[in-house]
Structures are given as C-alpha cells and as structure tokens.
C-alpha cells in the first residue's frame, strides 16, 4: 500500500515538473516573440538598406566581366523572399549568361522595333504625302486605344532601338527574365514588381549594377525563342533585369525625383504635405 502511494506521488511530481517546464518554455517563447520597438532618431544616418535604395541607379553600361554565378544565385535568393499576394509567389526565373543567346534576343527586339517604327512613325514620310496622313491617322487611333504603350518615352526609345542607337539589353553579361504565373492570386503583375525590386536592391548591395528591361516583353512575339528560353504556360515573360558590373560611378548622376503630395490624416485632421 505504502509502495503504491509512493509511486503515485512520484508520478504526480514528474507530471508537475513537466507542466512547470512547459509553462516556462511558453513564457520564454512569448518573450522571444514580443516585437522589439526600434526607434530611429530624426536625422539619423541612413542604414544599409536605405543606402542601397538611395544609391541604386539604372545601369546601361557594363564591364565585359561576367559576375560569378554564385552572386546571381544570391540576388535571386533575395527575390525568393519577396512578399506576394496570398504568398502565391507567382514567379520563376530564366538566367541568360550566353552571349549568343543574348545577341539573338537583341536581334529579335530590333526587328520588332523596326517593324513598329515603319508602322507608326509618320515622320519618315514627307509632309502632305498620302502615306504620312494614313500612318498618322493609324498612330493616333492606336495611341487613343493604348495610351501607355504609345507614350512619347517608349516611342522615342523604339526608334533608337530600330536605328541601332540604343541596345535593348545594354550589352549586359547576364540577363534575368522574370516569368509570371498567370494563375497568381489577385494582381500577379504587382508581385513581379516586388520580386524584381528585391533582386535589384540585393544586387546594388553587393556591388552589381542592374537595369529593368520592359522592352524584353517584345521577345514574347517569338514563339521559337520563347520555347528555347523555357518560357511556357502557365508562365509568361513579364519583365527582365540585366545585371553586371557598372562602368564608372553611376550614383554620381542621380535622376531627378518629384516631391509627391502626401495626404496625411492624423488626429482627425487632414494635412497636405510635399
Ligand atoms: C518596370 C520597368 C521597366 C523599365 N524598362 C526599361 C527599359 O526597357 N530600358 C531601360 O533602359 N530602362 C528601363 N527602365 C529603367 C527606367 O528608365 C529608370 O528606372 C528610370 O528612368 C529612373 O532612373 P533610375 O532607375 O536610374 O533611378 C525600366 C524601369 C522599370 C521600373
């Protein structure tokens, strides 16, 4: 009888010890999870992330030297950790480091731009000519239908690409194609912008230069090339980022930035800040 009691006491004690240990662990875990509030003094120095954001520039002149593969893997890893709607991660990447393949991509874009300028650039024809009037009418109609695509900035660049004055991929040694999974949650195009931003800033932080290449979408019209590059449904080519070592010190030439209006609601009041 006494022996049984002792055994029960022993079991109770062990159970109590286990419970105390579990409680302690829970308390410790809660303490670890509690967010630490980190204040930044007004006028404090920029931290490393802010510095990468402020010094990044679009690089259009690259050294011939190919960045090592591990550095490209490293910046893609920054992309892998980008946020996405519903954590659907609607992206995949094609890394092109083959000179002949980049040249083929460039050639196709130039051919498309040549076709586009012939079809929309009425200034190629003498004033008063029938051709000029017809192309002008056609261009105006297309500009009304797709005002973003017929914006003067890309239209000017298209003409320069067609004339060979502006290289689409800027002769970069590495081109990363970002593919978008069309089945992504919500608006997957936004996730593509987010993943690309991680890649670009990751590159900046390790001394690599990048430039987004929206014109890369011209490649989509070449089915054979798309197949060679491994772009297949449900993925489509969304954007590209060219990567390499920058020539010179591009942070010296900052592009002007507007001060945007900020509507600031606080304490029941609206303020308009700039
Ligand atoms: C989505 C996107 C597409 C772009 N496409 C091109 C492009 O095709 N060619 C190019 O030279 N620059 C391209 N740019 C770079 C912009 O021209 C550049 O970001 C802008 O002029 C601001 O200059 P910064 O990046 O040096 O600050 C693109 C930028 C973004 C965000």
Image: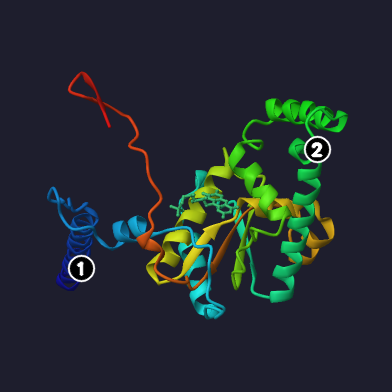
The extreme left residue here reads 41
Mark 1 neighbour class, 10 Å CA radius: few under 14, some 14 to 19, many 20 or more: few
State the count of labels. Answer: 2
Residue 80: image x %, image y %?
A: 50, 61
Query: Sequence order check: which comes first, mark 2 or mark 1?
Result: 1
Residue 209: image x %, image y %?
A: 47, 67
Residue drawn 12% across the image and 50% down it = 41
> To which residue does mark 2 refer?
125
Ligand 1 within 8 angstroms of badge 2 C-beta: no
Residue 14 — which label? Answer: 1
Q: CA distance from mark 2 to mark 1?
A: 94 Å
Residue in the foreground of this view, choosing between 202 and 92: 202
Residue 270 seen in render: yes
Residue drawn 65% across the image and 61% down it = 167
Quadrant position of the N terminus in the picture: bottom left
Mark 2 in CB contact with mark 1 (< 8 angstroms) = no
Q: Compared with residue 42, is residue 140 higher up or lower down, i.e. above or below?
A: above
Mark 2 neighbour class, 10 Å CA radius: few under 14, some 14 to 19, many 20 or more: some
């Amino acid at each position: 009888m006494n022996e049984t009691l002792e055994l029960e006491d022993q079991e109770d004690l062990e159970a109590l010890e286990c419970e105390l240990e579990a409680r302690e662990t829970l308390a410790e875990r809660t303490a670890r999870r509690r967010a630490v509030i980190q204040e930044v003094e007004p006028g404090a120095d920029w931290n490393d992330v802010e510095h990468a954001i402020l010094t990044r520039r679009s690089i259009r002149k690259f050294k011939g030297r190919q960045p090592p593969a591990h550095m490209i893997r490293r910046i893609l890893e920054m992309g892998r950790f980008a946020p996405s709607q519903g954590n659907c991660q609607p992206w995949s990447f094609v890394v092109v480091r083959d000179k002949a393949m980049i040249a083929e991509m460039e050639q196709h874009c130039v051919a498309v731009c040549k076709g586009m300028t012939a079809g929309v650039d009425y200034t190629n024809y003498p004033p008063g000519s029938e051709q000029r009037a017809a192309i002008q009418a056609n261009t105006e109609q297309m500009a009304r239908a797709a005002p973003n695509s017929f914006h003067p900035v890309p239209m000017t660049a298209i003409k320069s690409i067609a004339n060979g004055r502006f290289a689409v991929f800027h002769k970069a040694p590495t081109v990363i194609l970002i593919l978008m999974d069309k089945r992504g949650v919500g608006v997957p195009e936004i996730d593509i912008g987010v993943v690309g931003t991680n890649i670009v800033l990751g590159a900046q932080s390790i001394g690599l230069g990048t430039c987004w290449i929206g014109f890369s979408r011209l490649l989509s019209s070449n089915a054979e090339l798309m197949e060679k590059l491994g772009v297949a449904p449900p993925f489509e080519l969304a954007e590209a980022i060219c990567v390499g070592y920058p020539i010179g010190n591009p942070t010296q030439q900052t592009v002007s930035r507007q001060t945007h209006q900020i509507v600031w609601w606080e304490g029941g009041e609206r303020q308009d800040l700039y």
